[in-house]
Image (spheres, rainbow, N blue to C red):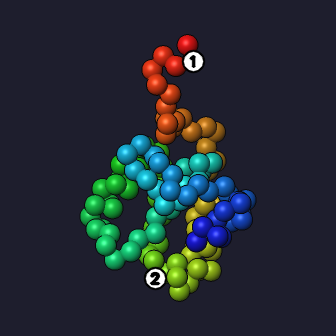
């Protein structure tokens, strides 16, 4: 999937892979629209995922999920669905996420 999302190939949307968002690591993340994309295998717990997604939505993110099977067997359909959803979302002016590697306290003062 990354091969299709990298270098802004999907509708010009820039995605990050394995993006750290607070205490969560998103499979893919598009900062310009606040879109989290998750690809789930058989080991995912739907109840846990639903709770994590609810937290993300309260924080202003949008979440879309696909199964590993869909990605492996129907990548074109997945990409069309993802593009349609991404295009339906409003652009975000700025994202104020904490830097994943903050400098030690006092450094740079």
- Depicted 103 relative to depicted 4: above or below: above
Is the Cβ of the residue at disc 2 closer than 8 Å to that at disc 1? no
- Depicted 31 relative to depicted 66: above or below: above
Instruction: State the mark number for residue 28.
Output: none
Q: Is residue 101 left or right of residue 43?
A: right
Instruction: State the mark number for residue 69.
Output: 2
Measuring from the top left, give residue 30's x and y in whole percent: 59, 54
Front-most of 22 and 88? 22
Measuring from the top left, give residue 72's x and y in whole percent: 52, 82
Residue at mark 1: 108
Measuring from the top left, give residue 50's x and y in whole percent: 32, 61
Q: How many C-alpha atoms fall within 10 Å of the one at disc 1: few (<14), some, or many (≥20)? A: few
Q: Secondary structure at mark 2?
A: helix
Does the image show residue 8? yes
Location of the N terminus by quadrant is: bottom right
Cα separation, mark 2 vs mark 1, equals 48 Å
What's the residue at 55%, 13% (across, down)? 109
Front-most of 17 and 46? 17
Q: Is residue 71 left or right of residue 58?
A: right
């Amino acid at each position: 999937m990354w091969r299709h999302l990298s270098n802004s190939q999907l509708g010009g949307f820039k995605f990050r892979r394995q993006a750290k968002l607070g205490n969560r690591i998103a499979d893919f993340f598009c900062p310009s629209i606040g879109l989290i994309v998750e690809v789930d295998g058989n080991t995912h717990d739907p109840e846990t995922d639903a709770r994590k997604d609810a937290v993300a939505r309260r924080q202003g993110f949008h979440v879309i999920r696909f199964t590993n099977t869909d990605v492996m067997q129907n990548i074109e359909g997945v990409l069309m669905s993802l593009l349609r959803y991404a295009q339906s979302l409003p652009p975000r002016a700025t994202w104020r996420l904490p830097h994943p590697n903050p400098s030690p306290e006092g450094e740079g003062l």
